[in-house]
Image (cartoon, grey):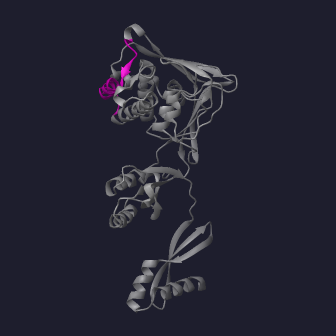
Amino acid sequence: MSARPVLYLEPVGGIAGDMFLAAALDLGVSVEALAAGLKGLMVPGWRFEVTRQVRHAISGTHLDVVVDEAAAGHSHRPLAEIRKLIDGAATLPPRARARAQAVFEALGAAEAKVHGVTLDAVEFHEVGAVDSLVDICGAAMVLELLGDPEVFAAPPPLGSGSTRTAHGVMPVPPPATLELLRDLPVKFEGVGELTTPTGAALLKVLCTVGGPPELLVERVGYGVGTRDWPDRANVLRATLGRPVHGAALGTFVVEANLDDCSPQLLGTLLEGLFEKGALDAYVLPATMKKSRPGHLLAAVVPADKRDAVVEALLKETTSLGVRFHRVERTALDRRFETVETPYGPVRVKLGFRGAEVWNAQPELEDCRAAAKQAGVPVKRVWAEALAAYYKR
């Protein structure tokens, strides 16, 4: 099975929903296929207008969602109405509907916190308008048309100054944008609103903000924004490729803090995590809130096994949440060689780089079995196996 493609976003001039769609079209996504996927939204009075434009000598695709306000109707929508529109869009694949819902949920949670109201009380203004509904559902549809890539993004520039909204003049970045990007790396630079709330929500929900794995670059596209910034090209660069080694897209550390979980459960789970594909798993003592003793349970997993391990942690422990982050990992190539000892054959695991062996360790289970049969300490079999390997 070939690895999933990788999409890497570089918000050179920031990111907005229309820039995301424009970059996808520049990568080769068909505007007709995109529009067909959005047809089921049953929101009238809009169309795509696609042009070629240049910003700071970089040529790319510019996209406008042109709205006939008389045909489209009101632009203020509560979250419940948006949920209903997306759920009813039969032309959107199920995964795209789920992603679009998640983006709006994130936007709603940010707006609710900023305005001090409940999530159900949030009423979207600019974001609830037709063009933003099309932008967000379109972004979810784009990922389907690109083959469901793993999406990474560089930290976005947020800009500065002020902007006028339905709530009046707001600072840049707007409060909802900053709330959405909490715990993510960002850049406080540039003049004007470089990253919009919609763009921030797409980064939050659809992307891993950080460097991508090593890529074989296949296509590059530029989505051109509306404004022409004096200090930078107002473009979103999108690079589509495949991981160099064609395997899992990097490695993740998945972890949870636990102060109310039985050690017996943790021991059983630790063994099960290896069956789920974990490369390593461990439990560390921790002092948690209210000075309660607890544990840090963590696993190192390939990207394609991450979701299975996350599910196991949530099902098999008392934790209500699990966090994960991508890590870099360097591993030696490995193979086994069998050596003869006075107690029988024992496999030795070799770690090597190129033709040079950097590490040699007897396989513990082989040593234990041989020691048990011979009635000698495991450490004696271990030493004999290691000596036999180096004599060779």
Image coordinates for residue 68, horizontal then vertical, percent: 42, 10
Examine the rendering and report whether any part of residue 24 can be seen.
Answer: no
The residues colored magenta run 72-93
**Quick check: 134 left or right of 12?**
left
> Image quarter for residue 305?
bottom left
**Residue 375: % across, % down:** 40, 92
Tell me the quarter of the picture where residue 89 sits: top left
* Residue 66 visible in the current orientation: yes
Q: Residue at x 46, y 64 (%)?
A: 285
Q: Residue at x 53, y 25 (%)?
A: 22
Q: What is the count of numbered marks?
A: 0
Question: Which percent across, then down, holds residue 306?
Answer: 42, 52
Q: Nearer the viewer, residue 303 or 271?
A: 271
Q: Nearer the viewer, residue 251 or 59?
A: 251
Residue 110 inside the magenta-drawn segment:
no
- Where residue 125 appears, as percent x and y from the top left, is 43, 19
Q: At 35% across and 55% down in the image, what residue appears?
A: 312
The image shows residue 380, relative to residue 158, as above or below, that is below
Q: Is residue 116 above or below residue 319?
A: above
